[in-house]
Amino acid sequence: MSEQANLIIGVDAGTSVIKAVAFDLSGRQIAISSVRNTYVMGANGAATQSLSRTWQDCTTAIRGLSDKIDDLAKRTAAVALTGQGDGTWLVGAGNEPVTDAWLWLDARAAPTVSRIASGPTERARFEATGTGLNTCQQGSQLAHMQANHPEFLDRAEVALHCKDWLFLNLTGVRATDPSEASFTFGDFRNRQYSSTVIDALGLTNHRHLLPDIIDGTQETSPLTAEAARATGLREGTPISLGYVDMVMTALGAGVHTGDEGAACSTIGSTGVHMRAVKSDKVYLNVEGTGYVICLPVPDMVTQVQTNMAATLNIDWALSLASDLLAEHGAAPSHSDLVNRMDHWLENAEPGALVYHPYISEAGERGPFVDASARASLIGLNSTHRFPNLIRAIVEGLGMATRDCYGAMGEMPSELRLTGGAARSAALRKVLASSLNIPVRVSARDEAGAAGCAMMAAVAIGVYPNMDACVAEWTTPLLGEHEPADQSLVPVYDGLFTTYRAAREALPPIWDSLAAQRAVQGVNS
């Protein structure tokens, strides 16, 4: 590393935005460049994304940093990658795409998930991976392709994830990381592929599609000449393949700081709820749901439950208001409405309505898996107004968070928060009171990019290990404890009992609605 090389670029290729973020070697964020991501929702629950467009957008985001940082190429010590998890990015001869990527949002594999999940080897698969089977995952999608689109697998030479595809374009190396490899096809205890899992998925004949596993804290690959021209960086710049975005965001936000009982939730478009534990302390629930995702720390993993939709529920409600106002020529911006949320929350009765935040067209995956699950609002009467709806939705996110942590064993003693919604003081109070624990907000703006940049910092020797990096990059950015509102705790205890009872009673209704949609040819 030259004396001039004093920056690390973290690339976070998310579902909504592809970001390139520059950090100095002590973790201070210097600049960010971003490009809106593009994907297509199609018939029968399809959600696809162009591989070539994704690579172009990645290079555009990296090049955008050059407009903000002088001598970017000379100053870049390393580049690290993370990205949206799950999904299937098939690559064939000449490293060309076989077809558009199937994203984690894609619900087409639902019949295949039902078939595999009811099979005799499902529990063995779950106990190896620690991860419940759902439509998001590459294993489910490959099994579905095998049965319904065998031509894709016949033309494929390797099955990658989003960040793996970008790593291939930057380095020419076909690889994946220990986190995605083990929660999809492997064993979280040894971070390697498992024949038990691959056989349970019915993919034994396609094992050759699984790439080598490399750990970006231990090794890097050099930037190729072609990729150097595309990005504007120097040929040979070390490239670190990070872990999946969920765990990178949690690492950057403080899921692992050595404090026992701490947990981390990202309240963004989706809700991601995580706690760091030793691999021999993992709680594998009876239902067989959730994820176990390795941390880039020896023998440490995260237990994870993920809601398909978190702030997407809020966006839906705000869109209702915007659409109605637009008809009268007074449409406010989305940000204007977001700025009103705390006021609405404070002026609505707590615990008056039950809202299940299952608004995703792909259903729900945490703490239960049901592709037919849909959002519901229970308890409306003629006195309720829009603020009551907003409060019910936010409280629904609190209930979903509590539901998820309950499926991981003991409740955490402290919750670290990241994601755009964490800016809302009223929402933070709802979350703290729903779990009856204090919350702390991470001041890290781009936690996902920071998490993978931390891996690169260890890989190139800036820090001797990840714990040393965490002590400088993460712990100092955790805010003050914000306690639960003790007047709300008993209200939310009662609300959660009702929330769970209704959730457990609703599956036959969801199934009936799904059957009706199928007859009518409706996709949502």
Image (cartoon, rainbow, N blue to C red):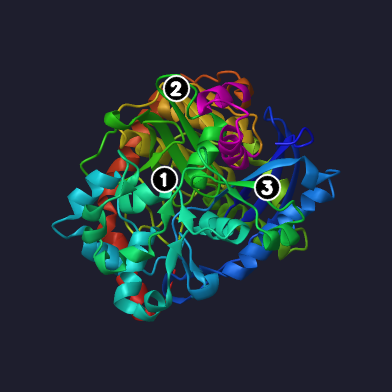
Question: Residue 192: x percent and y percent?
Answer: 33, 47
- Mark 1 and mark 3 in contact (Cβ < 8 Å)? no
Between discs 3 and 1, the one toward the N terminus: 1
Instruction: Please indicate whether residue 235 sits to the left or right of residue 202 in the image.
Output: right
* Residue at the disc numbered 2: 437
Tell me the amino acid under the disc marked 2.
Ile
Q: Which residue is drawn at 44% across and 31% down?
A: 297
The local crowd at label 2, few if under 14, some if 14 to 19, many if 20 or more residues have their Cα within 10 Å, is some
Vertical relation: 393 (above or below) 302: below
- Mark 1–mark 2 Cα distance, whole angstroms, equals 32 Å
* Residue at the disc numbered 1: 178
Tell me the amino acid under the disc marked 1.
Pro
Which label sits in the foreground, 1 or 2? 1
- Mark 3–mark 2 Cα distance, whole angstroms, equals 44 Å
Q: What element carries label 1?
A: helix
Q: Residue at x 78, y 53 (%)?
A: 64
Tell me which corner region of the image, top left, top right, bottom left or bottom right, holds residue 489.
Answer: top left
- Tell me the magenta residue range: 446-472
